[in-house]
Image: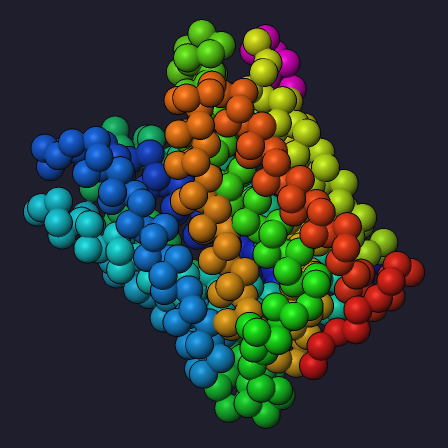
Amino acid sequence: MQERLPREIWVLVSTSFLIAIGYGIVAPTLPVFVRSFDVGITAASLVISVFALVRLLFAPMSGRIVGRVGEVPTFTIGLSVVALSTGACAFVASYWQLLVLRGLGGIGSTMFTVSALSLLIRLAPVHMRGRASGMWATGFLLGNVIGPLVGGGLAAVSLRAPFLVYAAMLVLVVGVALTMLRGRVGVGPGEAAAVAPPAKFRVALSHPAYRAALAANFANGWVVFGVRVALVPLFVVEALGQAETWGGIALAVFAVGNAATLVFAGRLADRRGRRPPVLAGLAVSAVATAVLGFLTDPVLFLAASLVAGMGSGLVNPPVNAAVADVIGSRASGGTVLAGFQMVADLGAIVGPIAAGALAEVAGFGAAFAMSGAAAFVALGFWLRAPETLPSATAPKATESS
């Protein structure tokens, strides 16, 4: 009989699903809501960008907070900050109030992201880390697919309603987390100190597998969270001559490909090692992304998007599991995980700017090719990285204490 994941892992998966639904509920409404304050497109974009920027800047502090007070307190505090700031957005009277509240939401967001991943690492058995990471990522993905559908319906009722619904969902998640995660060994400040001192970023950075994970997460932020969202809708309309709805279809097809391989990649990473699925995923993602800008047939473009999504899905769970292997089960990975998160946010910020500028002067083909190159660079790091799964037959890197 197949061994089951611990109950607490399913709690984290469920909360990630609800959080992602809430984020998706707000996402389609936010730009329209900002414009209702009679501001320009640049000002509206700033409200969206400030969330990611604050996440990037506050990530190191979040890592230190996790190391000092524990994962569960940081998780619940972060969610509470997002709940309060999001609920307050429904009552703002000016653009600047909304901008400040979204910035506060970014602080809470990075707190619960870093602490949730640290908690996932601590609670998942070593031989099930890939599977746990795959389920956690799947929860976020499915939530992001369902959320916009719900948000569109709420926006038809009121532009302020999605913020209240998201805040209420976060309050529910906080209650679940406090009830079902409190008291876990190693998640409180005193317990954490008794188990092992927090892992240090500079120590992890000396590990080639962690450096490879940083490269892969930067490429993931660049390609998946940055360029895919920023350029695919424009390419579909301006280069392929299709209606705007095709852009949404292309993004949905990518998500389907992603969902199709996440759980499989996690299981494979636990059985065969972290490197095989990462190497395959980065190679597939790099090639599929690089050719997107040269395709002229919409059907082929959707097929390539599907393949790119499958490649991306192969990368995420084993990379997370490799980072967990480097940190070890006994130590809090606050600053190590904060650095891991930061490179993805940095890629999501830099990628669209660099690719967009290149697209203007050299065309979409060059922009997507450069994005594929980011995945190829990460592939080079992983070719030189050791295997971190203790039971794998590939060259091993022992789990750090």
Residue situated in front as seen by the camera: 322 or 115:
322
Residue 65: give x, y in percent of width and height.
42, 77
Q: Which residue sits at x=60%, y=52%?
A: 215
Looking at the image, what colour scheme do you see? rainbow
Where is residue 241 shown, x and y percent of the image? 45, 7
Residue at 60% x, 83% y: name it: 185
Residue 65 is left or right of residue 280, and the answer is left
The quadrant where residue 297 appears: top right
Q: Is residue 379 magenta?
A: no
Left or right? Give the position of 245 relative to 214. Answer: left
In the image shown, does 146 or 276 lie closer to the viewer?
A: 276
**Residue 131 visible in the shown view:** no
Decide: is 92 above or below 208.
Answer: above
Quarter of the image containing the N terminus? Answer: bottom right
Residue 385 quadrant: bottom right
Helix, strand or loop for the magenta stretch, by majority: helix
Name which residue lies at 58% across and 28% down: 369
**Part of the protein shown in magenta:** 297-303
Percent coordinates x, y for residue 35 in the rendering: 17, 33
Q: Residue furthest right?
A: 393
Q: Residue at x 51, y 91 (%)?
A: 190
In the image, residue 328 above or below residue 131: below
Position of 178 relative to 133 (above/below) = below
**Is 1 on the left or on the right of 82, as rendered?**
right
Instruction: Evaluate whether residue 358 shows in this view.
Output: yes
Residue 137, percent across and down? 59, 50
Residue sitting nearer the eye, 54 or 4: 54
Give the quadrant of the C terminus: bottom right
